[in-house]
Amino acid sequence: MLLVTITLLLTRPPSAENDYAEAMKLANGLGGTRINLAKAAEYFQRAAAKNAPEAEARLAYWIKNGVGGLVKDNVKAEQWAKKALADGLTAKATNSVEAQTELAMLYRSGLGVSRDLGKAVDLYEKAADQGHAAAQNDLGVLYQFGEGVPKNLDRAAELYQKAADQGYLAAQNNLGVLYEHGQGVTKDVIKAAELYQKAVNSGHADAQNNLGKLYEHGQGVTKDLGKAAELYQKAANQGDAAAQNRLGALYQFGKGMPKDVGKAAELYQKAADQGDAAAQYNLGVLYQYGQVVPKNLRKAAELYQNAVDQGHAAAQNDLGVLYQFGEGVSQDLGKAAELYQKAADQGYVAARNNLGLLYEYGQGVPKDLGKAAELFQKGADQGNAFAQNTLGRLYEYGQGVPKDLGKAAELYEKAANQGNQTAVANLKRLSGQRK
């Protein structure tokens, strides 16, 4: 009898709780485990098949967002969320930090329940107060972006630190972002790089992308385009859209690797398919000018519009250009002006120049030389040669600003020193007139 009992114990299949725990290790790189999202998805599915509500909830979220190679399916995601609730997730949340965290995630995302950030915060707080790293990290995100709570970067940093101290990779990455940008903590790019590196060591894709950016630009680390490309590639291999886009840019311009615009287009497409606005814009540029892909202005306009819908300034400007000249879309100067304004409001200098020209000539907007001068002044203050030259012309002829030849010469000279040939000619002509 004893032998039979031992044999049964040794051959008993893993419990749902063990499958869920293994999935969380693989998903988050816990205990030095290397992140493997596809494998984690398998374990979540195994635990969910055994009616573990925590796994069912997590699976719902992953299916909704297409994580771990799972096909995005809002209907299935909702079904799994409701099953988690039916299998007792709410009851388990009374005394289980894992259940509290998973139920909070459902309330945060509105899966299986009406979206309720207040309830999500309460549940995250309960789990975080008990030292649960995932809850500390997720609550930190809510404080960082002011979701369900007043925005509080200090509190976000505090929560990320607690989770990071437990080796929670997402928190190490998130805390690194705060240090990189000086939000809630004193800016320290070297500290950011160290935090990213910790998460990189276990394969965290966002950290790989973020550390890659630092290597690309030489911030907090010695500039190394090869290292940047290597990190972007690792993240891209995990399906990280931002890394796919950044790696595409390195290929497009031959930075840190041989130039390969075809490879760039392929990477942009992968990222664009995931809704990455920067990649949609970059791919749009390739279609607009027929680089590697067949020239297709309509396709370019569609891609720009996708990025515009996410507030991408360069896409707003470039789509404005297409509307201004009727390329790939029906000509619409009013629409062009509207798009330029959106980009200009974000400080995008090319849009300020383009909108300034519309005001100068009364195209799509009422003619207003004062407004034009104001926009060119903003561009000039940003060091843009075109804006400096154009504003110089307005000062030379007293259009929208008081006539001031000295100011005109000063602006022409600034633009000429940047190689603007029109400004060189204007400065030479004006100098001849003033002798």
Image (tube, grey):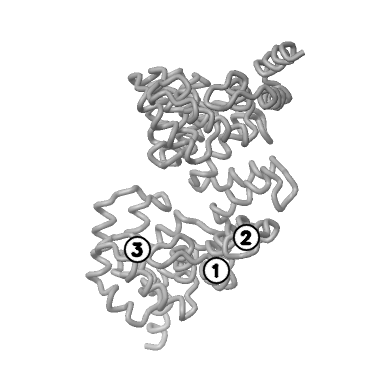
Q: Is residue 188 above or below residue 283?
A: below
Which amino acid type is shown beneath numbered disc 3? Answer: Arg
Please identify the quarter of the rendering in which residue 46 is found: bottom left
Please identify the quarter of the rendering in which residue 32 is found: bottom right
Mark 2 or 3, nearer chain start: 3
Q: Position of residue 392 (x, y in %)?
A: 63, 23
Left or right placement of residue 303 versus residue 106 in this view: right
Q: Quadrant of the N terminus?
A: bottom left
Work out whether residue 23 can be spotted.
Answer: no
Residue furthest out toward the bottom? 2
Q: How crowded is the residue under tag 3: few (<14 C-alpha within 10 Å), some, or many (20+)? A: many
Mark 1 or 2, nearer chain start: 1
Q: In the depicted view, which residue is nearer to us: 302 or 43?
A: 302
To which residue does mark 3 refer?
108
Left or right placement of residue 320 versus residue 243 in this view: left
Q: In the depicted view, which residue is nearer to us: 285 or 166?
A: 285
Q: Position of residue 353 (x, y in %)?
A: 53, 28
Helix, strand or loop for disc 2: helix
Residue appearing at x 42%, y 75% in the figure = 125
Q: How crowded is the residue under tag 2: few (<14 C-alpha within 10 Å), some, or many (20+)? A: many
Label 3, label 1: how far apart the Cα atoms are: 22 Å
Label 1, label 2: how far apart the Cα atoms are: 11 Å
Work out whether residue 244 can be spotted.
Answer: yes
Please give the label number shown on residue 154.
Answer: 1
Which amino acid type is shown beneath numbered disc 2? Answer: Tyr
Mark 3 or 1, nearer chain start: 3
Which amino acid type is shown beneath numbered disc 1? Answer: Asp
Q: Position of residue 81 (x, y in %)?
A: 27, 62
To which residue does mark 2 refer?
179
Residue appearing at x 49%, y 25% in the figure = 369
Residue appearing at x 36%, y 28% in the figure = 335
Q: Is residue 85 above or below residue 192?
A: below
